[in-house]
Image: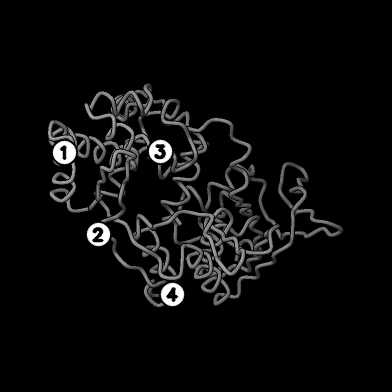
């Protein structure tokens, strides 16, 4: 074994899934989480006998979770109770008009026809464009590292980058497709996937509707927080040590090599053998998830420090988007 011990900072979905993959590959993994509970942004609040999820309300891209559990040689259905949604959700407007969104495109078109018949064909074209954007994004930046940005700027990718409308806003893109202000508003809301404004977010986000309409959505029985609970359970089955209430102050660097982390009143040292820059250590798991031989991966990276909270260091919504999309796509 090249690297015996791994420390992962943050028990969000990215941290937990990385821990599972590493532990399944034979590494001794410890996850350090500053909060009382695992989950990161996918968490919950309890008040007056009620429980509220702080994350999303539904699950998309189920195949990502299937991939993770298959890698761990487990069945997703043994850990999570998922119910396919139809309709996916219901939209309300103050004038009493509603729209039930469905993965069945014909059903959604019938809903649109009730109040915006002129936009039925526009919706069909919009969804086709959304699928195309998703396919392009998947092969370019969704599964690549942020450190690969120079790679994306190569001439052979410029056509693809222009095709996903990255130079105009989501709002402008939606107005080009739909005449109905209601539909413009509906599709603008997909910018809220990472808390952005459709008036500033690049039209690249128009790929998100395909994730719902094209790939489907599921309800997690018991609430969305069941997801990090399931990942934590699976991680512990591979002897991953998860320490909550354990804030990390800094990553210790010696001779350009990450050697450990510093937490309150304690220093944790990690066994290392390489001089690889830290950004490539992040790349080892998050950007090369299909590498199943982690000895190969760790010839490039001595240790992985994965932390969803790194996102707060990014000021651009585009960078934050690709960061989280990359993690969620390759859990």
Q: In this view, does 4 lie to the left or right of 261?
A: left
Q: Say if 246 sits above or below 287 in the image.
A: below
Separation (CA) of disc 1 from disc 2: 19 Å
Q: Is residue 195 left or right of residue 92?
A: right
Residue of label 2: 86
Residue of label 3: 141
Upstream in sequence: badge 3 or badge 2: 2
Separation (CA) of disc 3 from disc 2: 30 Å
Across and down, in percent, residue 203 comes to 36, 29
Q: In this view, does 327 lie to the left or right of 92?
A: right
Upstream in sequence: badge 4 or badge 1: 4
Q: Say if 278 sits above or below 285 in the image.
A: above
Q: Residue at x 63, y 69 (%)?
A: 28
**Around disc 1, counting alpha carbons within 10 Å, would you say few (fewer than 14), some (14 to 19), or many (20 or more)?**
some
Separation (CA) of disc 2 from disc 4: 22 Å
Residue of label 4: 79
**Around disc 3, counting alpha carbons within 10 Å, would you say few (fewer than 14), some (14 to 19), or many (20 or more)?**
many
**Around disc 4, counting alpha carbons within 10 Å, would you say few (fewer than 14), some (14 to 19), or many (20 or more)?**
some
Upstream in sequence: badge 3 or badge 4: 4
Please name which of the two marks, 3 or 1, marks the residue nearer to the observer: 1
Upstream in sequence: badge 2 or badge 4: 4
Separation (CA) of disc 4 from disc 1: 36 Å
Separation (CA) of disc 3 from disc 4: 30 Å
Please name which of the two marks, 1 or 2, marks the residue nearer to the observer: 2
Mark 3–mark 1 contact, CB under 8 Å? Answer: no
Residue of label 1: 124
Upstream in sequence: badge 1 or badge 2: 2
User: The N terminus appears in which quarter of the rendering?
Assistant: bottom right
Upstream in sequence: badge 3 or badge 1: 1
Q: Nearer the viewer, residue 111 or 13?
A: 111
Mark 3–mark 2 contact, CB under 8 Å? Answer: no
Please name which of the two marks, 3 or 4, marks the residue nearer to the observer: 4
């Amino acid at each position: 074994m090249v690297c015996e011990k791994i420390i992962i900072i943050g028990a969000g979905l990215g941290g937990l899934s990385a821990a599972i993959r590493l532990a399944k590959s034979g590494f001794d993994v410890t996850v350090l989480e500053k909060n009382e509970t695992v989950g990161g942004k996918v968490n919950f609040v309890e008040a007056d006998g009620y429980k509220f999820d702080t994350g999303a309300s539904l699950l998309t891209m189920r195949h990502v979770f299937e991939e993770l559990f298959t890698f761990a040689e487990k069945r997703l259905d043994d850990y999570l109770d998922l119910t396919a949604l139809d309709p996916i959700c219901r939209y309300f407007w103050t004038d009493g008009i509603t729209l039930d969104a469905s993965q069945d495109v014909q059903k959604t078109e019938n809903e649109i026809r009730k109040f915006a018949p002129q936009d039925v064909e526009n919706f069909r074209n919009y969804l086709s464009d959304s699928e195309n954007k998703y396919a392009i994004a998947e092969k370019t930046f969704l599964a690549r590292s942020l450190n690969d940005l120079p790679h994306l700027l190569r001439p052979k990718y410029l056509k693809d980058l222009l095709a996903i409308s990255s130079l105009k806003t989501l709002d402008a893109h939606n107005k080009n497709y739909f005449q109905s202000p209601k539909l413009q508003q509906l599709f603008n809301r997909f910018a809220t996937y990472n808390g952005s404004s459709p008036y500033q977010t690049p039209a690249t986000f128009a790929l998100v509707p395909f994730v719902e309409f094209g790939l489907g959505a599921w309800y997690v029985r018991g609430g969305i927080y069941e997801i990090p609970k399931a990942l934590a359970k699976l991680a512990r089955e591979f002897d991953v040590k998860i320490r909550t209430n354990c804030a990390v102050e800094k990553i210790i660097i010696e001779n350009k090599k990450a050697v450990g982390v510093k937490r309150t009143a304690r220093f944790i040292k990690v066994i290392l053998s390489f001089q690889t820059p830290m950004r490539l250590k992040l790349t080892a798991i998050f950007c090369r998830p299909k590498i199943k031989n982690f000895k190969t991966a760790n010839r490039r990276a001595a240790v992985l420090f994965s932390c969803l909270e790194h996102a707060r260091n990014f000021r651009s919504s585009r960078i934050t988007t690709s960061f989280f999309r990359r993690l969620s796509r390759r859990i």
